[in-house]
Image (tube, grey):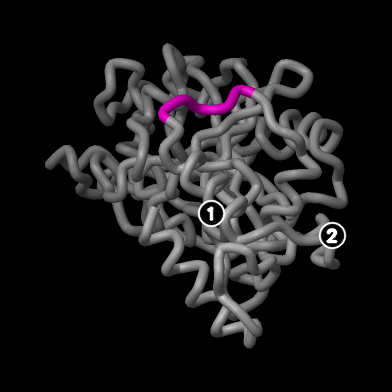
Amino acid sequence: MGFFQDSLKKWFYTNNSSAASSDARIPLLNANGTPKGSDTMSNVTKIIAQTLERRTRLTDFDLATLKQAVADQCLEKYGLKVGDQKTINGHTYVIAGLNPMKGTSTPYRVTADHVGLIVIPHTTTKWNASGNTYTGADGRGAGYANSDLHYYLVNTLLPLVRTDLGSANLIAHSKLLGNDVNQSGYNRMGSASGCTSNWGWVADQYISALSEVQVYGSVVWSSSGYDTGEACRQLDVFRHYNHTEIFGSEYPWLRDVVSASLAARASNSGNADYNAASFAYSVAALVLFK
């Protein structure tokens, strides 16, 4: 526990506290960032240590407490950690980490403090019913930006998420999404069977499928650099847990194109996988909660 004591004492000195003893008091915050009261350093240290040492993942937590943790930029201080989950109206929300899209270059990054939540609706959909990655339904074009998967997330799942979490609690930002496929381009399969060949910024996006980088920390089957876009950092939750620990027996589609007919998915066997875009597989997406 010495490390945590030292960190908290350093926090006190940085914030010009008059003392850094175990009896000194640490301020607690409301969800809007205003003072809520305080607790002793020894009590807060104990909560943080117990949270970090907790081996099990919470299966329920209070959204108001999560908002306090976001305002204070510390999950453990409020008894939370990455991987904890909550189910609302049959949809599972997993804490993916603080500020996964934080930056200073708006609207491409998010300046406001936030927490990433992976929403798992326990439903299935096709990446593209057309059976290829270059033709979305209803005349939509190529790539993930125009896919049936992204269309489902934006038009079917997002309204449900707004109901679960509250529209005012969600943050939008621009996403850099693949929007064209070279049907004979070379890919990571080592064949000229198609790859994503362009991208574009799409404004005011609240939700998207996960990229291979966000899950595995690296590309695996992703066809080209145009697949990853702004989703170029591994989420904290996957630094601590294998994706099968988060998704269980489900095998969600990822946003990466693999070829002109294949798209990436996270296999429930534990490996990085892909399959035909016309197959119906599970869904998982990232939203930002403030």
Region rendered in magenta: 55-59
Q: Where residue 194 sits: x, y (%)?
A: 29, 42
Q: In this figure, which residue is indicated by the disc labeled 1?
A: 45
Above or below, comparing residue 238 to residue 122 in the picture: below
Q: CA distance from mark 1 to mark 2?
A: 18 Å
56 within the magenta span? yes
Above or below, comparing residue 202 to residue 249 in the picture: below
Q: Is residue 286 left or right of residue 157?
A: left
Give me the residue at 68% from left, 65% from top.
Answer: 26
Q: Is residue 74 left or right of residue 221?
A: right
Q: Where residue 203 sits: x, y (%)?
A: 69, 62
Q: Which mark, residue 36?
A: 2
Q: Which amino acid, mark 2?
A: Lys
Q: Which amino acid, mark 1?
A: Thr
Q: Is residue 252 left or right of residue 219?
A: right
Question: From this viewpoint, is residue 272 visible?
Answer: yes
Disc 2: CA contacts within 10 A as few (<14), some (14-19) or many (>=20): few
Q: Based on the displayed image, in which of its 4 quarters is residue 244 positioned?
A: top left
Give me the residue at 33% from left, 21% from top.
Answer: 267
Question: From this viewpoint, is residue 175 visible?
Answer: no
Give me the residue at 42% from left, 20% from top.
Answer: 251
Image depth: mark 1 or mark 2 in front: 1
